[in-house]
Amino acid sequence: MLVAMLVFCRIGACLMLLPGLGGRNVPMQVRLFIAVALSLAFVPIVYGVVAAKVEHATIARLAGAIVAELLTGALLGFLVRIYIAALETLMNFAAQAIGLAGIAGMSVDDVSLPSLATLFSFSAIALIFIGDLHLELVRGLLDSYRRLPPGELFGFGAALASVVDQFTESFLVALRVASPFVLYSIGMNLAVGLINKFTPQIAVYFIATPFIMAGGLLLLYLGMSQFLSLFVMALGNWLRTH
């Protein structure tokens, strides 16, 4: 029972922060049953490693092991969540760049976003499950018992370095996805500014707003599949190599 409890602490904390499973869109009972099912599946595999940490352990040592497992699972889940957070942030900026920021979308993981950012977030999360990347996450969770021994606190310096590296890598990937919208916005606003300079009598900005929005939607239509493929491939490569 103690072994199963420690395994559940790591897996439950990880699933709590995962994109797609950690939000309110998935009922709490479903998340609980998934965490329990994964924990019971992991117990026979990692029993020998975890049992050595809880055998003849005192109450204080057991409490420390529970805290360590919770922090380890939360770190693993947070590293994956950074990717979706970076995509949401940059697509929020892209929505503002093409004039779609005022159109509210659905809530993704308890965060209210513009419709463009919601579309990309939902699509990316769906592709994660369609492409079986969640199975790579399960493999990574199982492999974490070899890299991060159960019941022991990880080095906070190494963990902070991993988080910073993950922020850098994920935001660079998200910037590649959002860069066409950023370049389009810069070019269109520069052109509108020049036109307004030559014809100050006409409110060019008010007239050009629908055309900028239409161009942004056309860019979205033409390139959304490539944008999402780039993001999912980058996330998949990270899951397979870490």
Image (cartoon, rainbow, N blue to C red):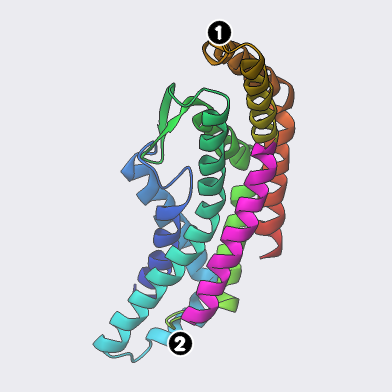
Helix, strand, or loop for circle 1? Answer: loop
Q: Position of residue 54 (x, y in %)?
A: 38, 84
Disc 2 residue type (three-letter)? Ala
Between 7 and 164, which is closer to the camera in this rendering? Answer: 164
Instruction: Indicate which label's residue lies in the foreground, 1 or 2.
Output: 1
Q: How many marks?
A: 2
Q: Earlier in the sequence, mark 1 or mark 2?
A: 2
Disc 1 residue type (three-letter)? Gln
Magenta segment, which residues? 155-179
Helix, strand, or loop for circle 2? Answer: helix
Q: Is residue 165 left or right of residue 237?
A: left
**Separation of marks 1 and 2 at Cα, in angstroms:** 80 Å
Q: Is residue 64 left or right of residue 101?
A: left
Residue at the extreme left: 59
Residue under label 2:
52
Between 197 and 115, which is closer to the camera in this rendering? Answer: 197
Residue 149 seen in the figure: no
Residue 140 seen in the figure: yes
Between 176 and 75, which is closer to the camera in this rendering? Answer: 176
Residue under label 1:
201
Location of residue 134 with respect to 25 vertically, above or below: below
